[in-house]
């Protein structure tokens, strides 16, 4: 049988010291070889399409097509829809009744030219309407947004 190897206290201390020295050397070599990541290396940029990129916007290739900016200043825009919403009656809107709840007395109209939906109350009806009817209506600003008023069925020309 083999005798178990025992180490004296002095041998154990030597081993611990050697491990410490070895660990310190590794640490110093990592510092010299690996340059620490600076702040510039940590920055990420988001492009106009929402993708993360490492290049700043000024250095990107300007040949890549960009989507047009759909947000613009509407303060001086006098489109028909804005004037109509501001209370200036230019033309009446044409839409389709999407939902009606006769018991509670309300419904929704979807504008045919756009994707906007407008609330209406039965007090704003000039004629009885059903789901799917084409209607002509005006808009008024209410407490919670625009609502359709003076609603009547659209007569095809």
Image (cartoon, rainbow, N blue to C red):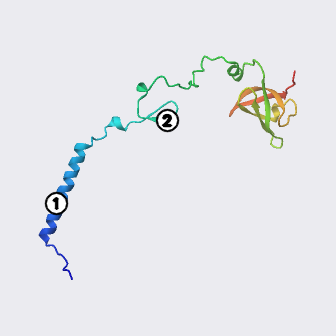
Q: Judge whether 88 appears above or below 56 on screen.
A: above
Q: Judge whether 12 appears above or below 32 on screen.
A: below
- Which residue is pictured at 84% across the width and 33% down the height? 133
Question: Horizontal and vertical percent for residue 105?
Answer: 81, 39
- Which residue is pictured at 83% across the width and 30% down the height? 134
Question: Horizontal and vertical percent for residue 18?
Answer: 16, 60
| Element under disc 2 | loop
Crowd rating for badge 1 (residues with CA inside 10 Å; few <14, some 14–19, many 20+): few
Number of marks drawn: 2
Which disc is residue 51 wearing? 2
Question: Horizontal and vertical percent for residue 28?
Answer: 20, 48
In front of the other: 69 or 32: 32
For the residues bearing labels 2 and 1, Cβ distance under 8 angstroms: no
Q: CA distance from mark 2 to mark 1?
A: 50 Å
Which disc is residue 143 wearing? none
Which residue is outermost to the bottom? 1
Q: Is residue 145 visible?
A: yes
For marks 2 and 1 on the same chain, the one whose residue lies earlier in the sequence: 1
- In the image, taking residue 30 as reference, residue 78 lies left or right, namely right
- Which residue is pictured at 41% across the width and 25% down the height? 58
User: In which quarter of the view is residue 144 placed?
Assistant: top right
In front of the other: 82 or 103: 82
- In the image, taking residue 101 as reference, residue 38 lies left or right, namely left
Is the C terminus in the top left, top right, bottom left or bottom right quadrant?
A: top right
Location of mark 1 (residue) = 18
Which residue is outermost to the front? 1
Question: Horizontal and vertical percent for residue 48?
Answer: 51, 30
Is the N terminus in the top left, top right, bottom left or bottom right quadrant?
A: bottom left
Q: Is residue 143 visible?
A: no
User: In which quarter of the view is residue 77 placed?
Assistant: top right
């Amino acid at each position: 049988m083999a005798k178990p190897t025992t180490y004296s206290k002095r041998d154990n201390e030597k081993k611990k010291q050697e491990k410490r020295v070895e660990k310190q050397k590794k640490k110093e070599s990592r510092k010299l070889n690996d340059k620490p990541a600076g702040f510039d290396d940590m920055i990420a940029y988001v492009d106009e399409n929402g993708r993360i990129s490492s290049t700043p916007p000024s250095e990107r290739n300007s040949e890549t097509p960009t989507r047009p900016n759909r947000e613009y200043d509407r303060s001086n825009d006098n489109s028909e829809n804005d004037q109509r919403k501001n209370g200036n009656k230019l033309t009446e809107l044409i839409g389709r009744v999407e939902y009606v709840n006769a018991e509670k007395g309300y419904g929704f109209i979807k504008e045919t030219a756009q994707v906007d939906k407008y609330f209406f109350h039965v007090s704003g009806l000039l004629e009885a309407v059903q789901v799917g009817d084409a209607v002509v209506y005006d808009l008024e600003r209410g407490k919670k947004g625009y609502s359709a008023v003076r609603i009547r069925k659209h007569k095809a020309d």
